[in-house]
Image (cartoon, coloured by chain):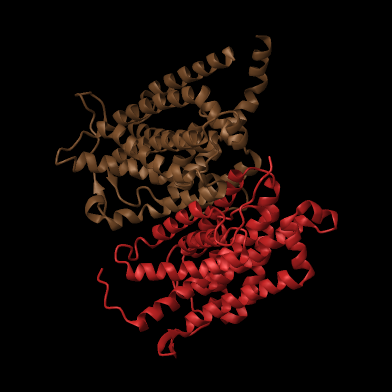
Amino acid sequence: MLVSAFTWTEFAQQIAAGVREGAIYAGLALALVIIYRSTRVINFAQGEMATFTTFIAWSLMNNGLSFWAAFPIVLAIAFVGGVAVERVLIRPVENASVLTIVILTLGLALLLNGLMSMIWGGQNRQFHGPFSTRTIDVGGVPISIQDIGIVVTSLALVALLALFFRYTKLGLAMRAAAVNPDSSRLVGVRVGWMLALGWGIAAVLGSVAGMMIAPVVFLDPNMMQTILLYAFAAAVLGGLDSPIGAVVGGILLGVTITLLGRYVEFIGSTLKLPAALFLILVLLLVRPGGLFGRVAVRRV
Amino acid sequence: MKRKFWLEVLGFLVLTAVVAVLPQLVSDFRTREFAIVGMYFIALLGLAILTGYNGQISLGHGAFMAIGGYTTAILSVDGIYGHAIRDLWTIPIAGLVAGVAGLMVGVPALRLSGLYLALITFGIAVSFPQLPKKFEGFLGGTTGNILNLVKPPFGLDTTPNRWLYYLTWGIALVLLAAAWWLLRGKTGRALQAIRDSEVAATSSGVNLALYKTLAFGISAFYAGVAGALYAMATAYVNPDTFAIILSVYLVVGLAVGGLGSLGGLIAGAALIYFLQNHADTVARWINHLPALELDPKQPGIPSVIFGAVLIIVMLLLPTGAGGLLRKLLGPLTSRLYTRS
């Protein structure tokens, strides 16, 4: 691979591409963090759940709906699906070991992945997004409208969620249930349902990420697998229990990885993921809680 | 405890007898299938030592199998300085190479617990298939390396599949005995103490760093041996031979076999092989249920069945086949203990 001459325009374009990737990672990482904060579980099925709902969107659009008409329907389906997963699969093993729950979400990922192949087939599909791929001139740098749309949509969703958690009673109850379930129960918060709600919101976040990235890559059952790993990395980078960390981590990771892939010849496009994981490993060794996370000190 | 010891020895002898007789009863093709089950069994033994007994989650054992498989492929075809090594002798080397890789992962793993470790090891599994593509000259790229077909050595008069079967199960039984011996003594107690409470283990004088790293190394050694055998069986290695999903399947096998039992792992290994290669049979069984019509050859069926089995096992039978067996035999054996 030959690294061509460096230009500032291209550098800016790479950063824009990195931010777009990062916005997707941020959305999915936030989904992981919301579930982790409340249930102390990493949902390995988050990616497949997102892809599954994206396929539903594809089917709806194939049947004549426009993207923005399908969008709310898909989000509603994702929400109900997320709540159902928590109720049916996670709740019965609430107090089981980490390994049990990890295995359970892996099982769900396999199941959903297989179902997608069965229903929609394994081949790549073109997913027509809501944004045009035409480029516009931003300060002398051509950037595609699609990239801008993805970043704006993802960040708007994050902002909406922040407002929800900060300013509504339900949001407060959810935060309380995550931080101290026992005391919350005493003051009348229905902790079980708050957890289910968290899974629902996470599923919605994932499905938005899926519908945003599908026009960029092709839609197939394995679409989110690598993206989920980057999202894991982003969540760990920001600190697994920090929502702000997930967003900052996502964008930071997206930009870093895009730049490394472009300008470090050895990494190129094949070693991007290993490079990302190596960065995370080093970070974890130096700062076990991630950038924004806190390391829990346990009393024994 | 004496009686438990002899019961376990008895179980081992019965298993050895079954393994020895089995190829006489089934076709050559089935013998090959059982050989591959044996390879999964070896890998699962390693994973059980690490995850089941030591509590360190690894979602990346497929990568250690790949290291073993590639070691065997490179040594038996290209060899060292042009001297190809007979495939049989590459097996221990493959185990050692994977074991060293395991120790190298084990050191940073000391500082990562639970979910973080699961994530990083999963990352290793996902990253590994990229390496052959990057270092094409050495590892063969996406096209992979072709190995020589397995041949019975020393002029033994038997079919290649039978040779592979006896080789695999011979190694498997030795490694099973080794794991059993390791886990029933001081090391096993230390590993389990760490799993149950790191703080309590440290306070009782268990060297946390030593045992946790050791568990990783031993576990990877097992996976490497399994990978070497697997490469010999398929006579071909490329990034897809040890796909990412293999690591997940191994965890499935471990969960189904039971986290705290060695014998139950055979059931887990059989399940991995059976579901991967005979998912269409399972689909045909399911079709006997009312209101279901599956096309056995449809893509995705293996994943759906794997996933469903995994979920059902975790929800209904969290201790796996080994745990079920113990529960069924429990009244019998505990009766024996109390009498002694």
Question: Quadrant location of the C terminus of chain A?
Answer: top right
Is A160 above or below relative to B71? below
The residue lying at 52 percent from left, 38 percent from top is B51
Is B307 above or below relative to A116? above
Residue A192, position in %: x, y?
A: 76, 55
Residue A118, position in %: x, y?
A: 50, 59
Is A116 above or below relative to B226? below
Residue B37 visible from this viewpoint: no
Query: Residue A271 appears in which quarter of the rendering?
Result: bottom left
Residue B4, position in %: x, y?
A: 57, 16
Is B259 above or below relative to B153? below
Question: Quadrant location of the N terminus of chain A?
Answer: bottom left
Residue B37, position in %: x, y?
A: 42, 35
The one nearer the camera, A2 or A210, is A2
Which tint was used for chain B?
A: brown
Which tint was used for chain A?
A: red
The one nearer the camera, B106 or B18, is B106
Query: Residue A276 appears in which quarter of the rendering?
Result: bottom left
Is A5 displayed left or right of B121 in the figure? left
Is B203 displayed left or right of B133 in the figure? right
Furthest residue to the top? B340
The residue lying at 56 percent from left, 49 percent from top is B115
The residue lying at 60 percent from left, 81 percent from top is A68
Is B151 displayed left or right of B108 in the figure? left
Residue B124 visible from this viewpoint: yes
Furthest residue to the left? B82
Q: How many marks?
A: 0
The one nearer the camera, B149 or B220, is B220
